[in-house]
Image (tube, grey):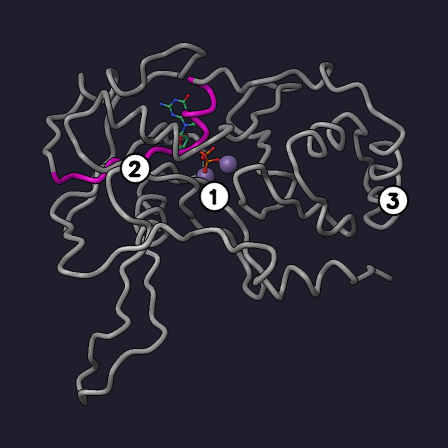
Amino acid sequence: MELFAVPDLPEIRAGDDLAAMVEARVDLREDDVVCVASTVVSKAEGRVVDLEDFPASPRAREVAARLAEVTGEEKDPRFAQAVIEESTELIMEAPFLLTATRFGHVTVNAGIDRSNVRDGDLLLLPERPSESAARLREGLSADRVVVTDTSGRPFRHGQRGVALGWAGMPASRDWRGEHDRDGRELGVTVQNVVDELAGAANLVAGEGADGTPVVVVRDWEFGDHDGSDEHYREVETDFVRQALRGWEYDG
Ligand code: GDP
Ligand code: MN
Ligand code: MN
């Protein structure tokens, strides 16, 4: 398996045909996986917004004031407003905003970025990343697309690449019913391959000024496994998320 970044992509603007820009720069093969940073998907889809467009509600002011109090840093209530508008649930309100997005992703600040955009601009996540992936796939000669983001995770330090959306392949390889080296049947292993591909692609894409938001994964095979498109946990069976609902930060 080999990974390489698509070279020479310019600054992406609203309305840009990202698939055509990739096609013009690399000779894709049908079985390539094209991993695209959500940042540029959002830019192409016009998801760059102005902080000014989010007049703060009383609720946003309350959330921002609490955050400012516990962190000792000034928090813009308009940013809190944007996070609230992009979320279906605020799971934690302090010492940071942990939220669920409309499409099921749980992340800090609804995944809104302020890096790789102009000052005062906010970059919202794509509205439906799997639909974005499917649209990109239409314009590409590769069959598989993953839309990625850099995201933190509980229990571990540091951020890593994760899949927000995907098209042309299942999200997971289901190993259940297959056997280990001692002949024991595997009972629980469902390997989330889109996250693993996103993590690998993110290594190549970088986080700063590299300018390499699109990474091609070549010669990686899904193999002869059952697939599953389950990715985001449903609240009903997400016990960690349920436990957090009753939790209060007390410094
Ligand atoms: P995220 O992980 O999806 O939030 O994206 P990042 O902001 O971490 O950026 C990932 C990669 O894309 C980095 O190499 C950035 O330099 C690059 N990048 C971000 N925006 C653009 C853009 O508009 N054009 C190009 N060519 N690269 C970009
Ligand atoms: Mn991001
Ligand atoms: Mn990133």
| Marks 2,3: beta carbons within 8 A | no
Q: Which residue is mark 2?
A: 167
| Marks 3,1: beta carbons within 8 A | no
Q: Give the side of residue 169 with respect to residue 189, left or right.
A: left
Q: Position of residue 102 (x, y in %)?
A: 58, 37
Q: Earlier in the sequence, mark 2 or mark 3?
A: 3
Q: Earlier in the sequence, mark 3 or mark 1?
A: 3
Q: Which residue is mark 1?
A: 150
The amino acid type of the residue labelled 1 equals Thr
Note whether 106 is above or below 47 in the view shown.
below
Residue at image position (61%, 17%) is: 49
**Ligand 1 image-quadrant field:** top left
Q: Earlier in the sequence, mark 2 or mark 1?
A: 1
Q: Position of residue 20 (x, y in %)?
A: 24, 16
Q: Which mark is residue 227?
A: none
- What is the span of residues highlighted in magenta in the rendered image? 31-44
